[in-house]
Amino acid sequence: MHPYLLQGLPLGPILVRRFAERIPDYQLDHCFEEDRFTTREVVAHLADWEKLFRARMELALATPGASITVYEEGERAEAERYCDRDLCDQLNLFEVERAKTIDFLSGLSGDQLRCPYLHPFFGVMVVEDQANMLLGHDLYHVEQLSAYLDAASELCG
């Protein structure tokens, strides 16, 4: 495993908190971009999907080559009522779940990191692929929150 992975993974929840807490409360449910999550929903999504991503890696270890379940983000957001979740609770949950993921990954051997699973859209992936995708997923949503913070500032200013 690349050493930057374990150094970078704790930063996602820190950056998400930093941006989300700077968006005014009255704008947490404002959709700044069409067909994207609100700030509240972004944070709930990250907390929720952290568990899903870790479960994929755990499945690969338990049943190498198993096919994973994929979810449509918007449908899951509605089903799980992201819009009703408390922002602070979800920020804390994201930190807790990420810590569990880091603990999980820290204990894996090189062979375990190479355990495969089948993603219906991406094909065969290994545990390490999913671990690396966490950083990209974080960055995608950090950029979104950064843009929301800019937009919120413009609305206020």
Image (cartoon, rainbow, N blue to C red):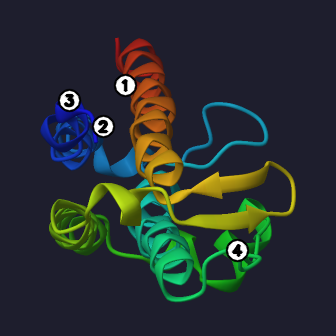
Q: Where is residue 96 in the image (x, y as percent from the top left)?
A: 17, 72
Relative horizontal placement of residue 130, taking residue 33 as reference (left or right): left
Q: Which residue lies furthest to the front in this view?
A: 111
Q: Where is residue 10 in the image (x, y as percent from the top left)?
A: 16, 47
* Residue identifier under label 3: 4
Q: Is label 4 or label 1 in front?
A: 4
> Is mark 4 in CB contact (under 8 Å) with mark 1?
no
Q: Residues within 10 Å of mark 3 (few under 14, many from 20)?
A: few
Q: Distance between the residues labelled 4 and 1?
A: 41 Å
> Which of disc 4 and disc 2 is earlier in sequence?
2
> Is mark 2 in CB contact (under 8 Å) with mark 1?
yes
Which residue is at 32% across, 55% downward? 110
Quadrant location of residue 154?
A: top left
Q: Distance between the residues labelled 2 and 3?
A: 29 Å
> Which of disc 1 and disc 4 is earlier in sequence?
4
Q: Is label 3 or label 1 in front?
A: 3
> Which of disc 1 and disc 2 is earlier in sequence?
2
Specify the label residue 149 is tagged with: 1
Q: What element carries label 3?
A: helix
Q: Distance between the residues labelled 2 and 1?
A: 6 Å
Q: Which of 33 and 155 is in front in this view?
A: 33
Relative horizontal placement of residue 114, taking residue 102 as reference (left or right): right
Quarter of the C terminus within the rendering: top left
Q: Which of 100 and 14 is in front in this view?
A: 100
Q: Which of 18 and 108 is in front in this view?
A: 108
* Residue identifier under label 4: 65
In the image, residue 108 sits, relative to residue 9, either above or below, namely below
Q: Position of residue 60 (x, y in %)?
A: 55, 75
Which residue is at 47% across, 37% downward? 141
* Residue identifier under label 2: 23
Q: Which amino acid does label 2 sit on?
A: Ile
Q: Is label 2 or label 4 in front?
A: 4
